[in-house]
Amino acid sequence: MSAHDRKPEVTAFFDEETNTASYVVRDPATNVAAIVDSVLNFDPSSGRTGKHSADQMITHVRDHDLTVDWILETHVHADHLSAAPYLQKELGGKLGIGKHIIDVQEIFGKVFNAGTEFERDGRQFDALFDDGDEFHLGSIPVRTIHTPGHTPACMTFVIGDAAFVGDTLFMPDFGTARTDFPGGSAAELYRSVQKLFELPDETRVFLCHDYKAPGRDAFAWETTIGEERRNNIQIRAGVGEDEFVAMRNARDATLAMPRLIIPSVQVNMRAGNLPAAEDNGVRYLKVPVDTL
């Protein structure tokens, strides 16, 4: 049986407040599971976090008697906070991300003046994956594909016949991720998508976000490589790199920053952990002025 013939069971959890799809991925043969791109709820007006999105995943894991081996991040998210530390405390498992997290930590460590106490070597994570690394989720082979462009650290996890692509692709009627964050590149995103298009047509594709394209009434977060290659409105087969880069750069110039980018990046570059408490026992997030 080939790696692609292994079919994990995928359960999605959609957080409409941040338009984020998170996943519990189960190997039916062993009941071993991975959690992909979790959400810690956050109210920026009060500075309070919440756990109701993560608790839904915990309930699912416990109700189905799953063993969590991995908590995976496709990249450092700029639109929601990761619940990885909370999930790891409750369920166990190793926390993994692409090895180019160190590039993101270096970039945003400077943006937020994080100081020397913030280590920029990825040590906050248990595993740093390189392009082409392989491991297993129970009996199912997992392969990593470095897919930069949206951020330098973006990593696609191909678990059996299912690819978890983060923000690299959206639904075919919506297109692709923005590339105007520090370290982003429209040309790199184009090349990353071409790597994904080499996967078999029937590969299931699970997205990190959906925003309901014009004319579509329901949120959606699952498609296939074949559908993306044939029908993606921005980067389907036949669209050249120069054409895509010009379109992507022009579109990005019109976009506002994500509502939660300031807290999200500071927390997620620390593997979902808040900065250390200051001498009054309170944790703080910084707001750079006139920079982002």
Image (cartoon, rainbow, N blue to C red):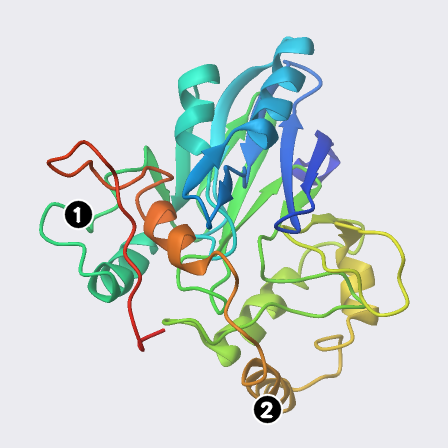
**What residue is shown with label 2?**
246
**What residue is shown with label 1?**
118
Tell me if residue 134 comes above or below residue 223 in the rendering. above
Please state which of the two labelled residues, at mark 1 or mark 2, is closer to the viewer.
1
Q: Which of the pair 135/147 is nearer the observer?
A: 147
The residue carrying pointer 2 sits among few (fewer than 14), some (14 to 19) or many (20 or more) residues within 10 Å by Cα, namely few
Total number of numbered discs in the rendering: 2
Q: Which of the pair 121/210 is nearer the observer?
A: 210
175 on left or right of 43:
right
Q: CA distance from mark 1 to mark 2?
A: 37 Å
The residue carrying pointer 1 sits among few (fewer than 14), some (14 to 19) or many (20 or more) residues within 10 Å by Cα, namely some
241 on left or right of 108:
right
Q: Are marks 1 and 2 in contact (CB under 8 Å)?
A: no
33 on left or right of 272:
right
Q: Secondary structure at mark 2?
A: helix
For badge 2, the amino acid type reads Ala
Q: Quadrant of residue 86?
A: top left
